[in-house]
């Protein structure tokens, strides 16, 4: 695949791509990173792609001080805007079993991981959290500060903690 055209990185993001990881970034991607680059006061955007994981970002997509940690697969469509301070994780990071959490190795090795998919023309408001296994349909909006733990169909506005349906979008 050819490199993206018009890749724009403003500030200094933290990027870590593990062995055998796959990263695909479309044209006209913009990444704003740093306290002076977004409406929040985060220090940077962070893109972490684990071993054998796949991160796909479509054309004309932008992020601001966004943390993306991918250990399975995260797909972000085209024409997507992701607000400042948003976190997108396809893992729980730790096991949900308290017995596993007594040992650091079993704690992290028994964590749950599930892919995330954001459709085209999605808008994620600032400081939202997109949790593992979530699919967000085309043209949908997630209100600022929301915690998304279940799928959002296309053409809907959701918000809150946990995020709930607010209204359909025409």
Image: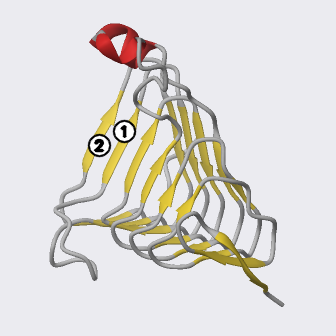
| Residue at the spot 20% in from the left edge and 66% down from the top edge | 42
Q: Nearer the viewer, residue 16 or 161?
A: 161
Q: Is residue 142 above or below residue 31?
A: below
Q: Nearer the viewer, residue 45 or 78?
A: 45
2 vs 1, front mark: 1
| Residue at the spot 66% in from the left edge and 49% down from the top edge | 134
| Residue lying furthest bottom | 170
Q: Based on the displayed image, in which of its 4 quarters is residue 58 positioned? A: bottom right
Number of numbered labels in the structure image = 2
Q: Based on the displayed image, in which of its 4 quarters is residue 48 positioned? A: top left
Q: Is residue 73 above or below residue 143?
A: above
Characterize the local packing of mark 2: few (<14), some (14-19) or many (20 or more) Cα atoms within 10 angstroms.
Answer: few
| Residue at the spot 29% in from the left edge and 43% down from the top edge | 15
For label 2, the residue is 15
Which x, y percent locates residue 63? Answer: 42, 67
Which x, y percent locates residue 70? Answer: 47, 37
Which comes before the other along the chain, label 2 or label 1? 2
Locate residue 149 relative to residue 36 in the image: left or right.
Answer: right
- Could you tell me which secondary element the residue under label 2 belongs to? strand
Which x, y percent locates residue 123? Answer: 59, 75
Q: Nearer the viewer, residue 92 or 123?
A: 92
């Amino acid at each position: 695949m050819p490199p993206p055209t018009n890749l724009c990185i403003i500030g200094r993001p933290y990027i870590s791509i593990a062995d055998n990881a796959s990263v695909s970034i479309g044209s006209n991607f913009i990444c704003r990173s740093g306290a002076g680059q977004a409406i929040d006061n985060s220090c940077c955007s962070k893109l972490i792609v684990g071993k054998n994981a796949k991160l796909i970002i479509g054309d004309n997509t932008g992020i601001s001080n966004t943390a993306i940690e991918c250990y399975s697969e995260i797909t972000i469509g085209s024409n997507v805007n992701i607000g400042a301070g948003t976190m997108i994780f396809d893992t729980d990071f730790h096991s949900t079993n308290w017995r596993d959490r007594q040992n650091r190795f079993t704690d992290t090795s028994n964590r749950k991981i599930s892919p995330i998919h954001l459709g085209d023309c999605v808008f994620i408001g600032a400081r939202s959290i997109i949790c593992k296994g979530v699919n967000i349909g085309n043209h949908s909006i997630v209100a600022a500060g929301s915690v998304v733990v279940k799928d959002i169909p296309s053409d809907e506005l959701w918000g809150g903690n946990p995020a709930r349906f607010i209204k359909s979008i025409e």
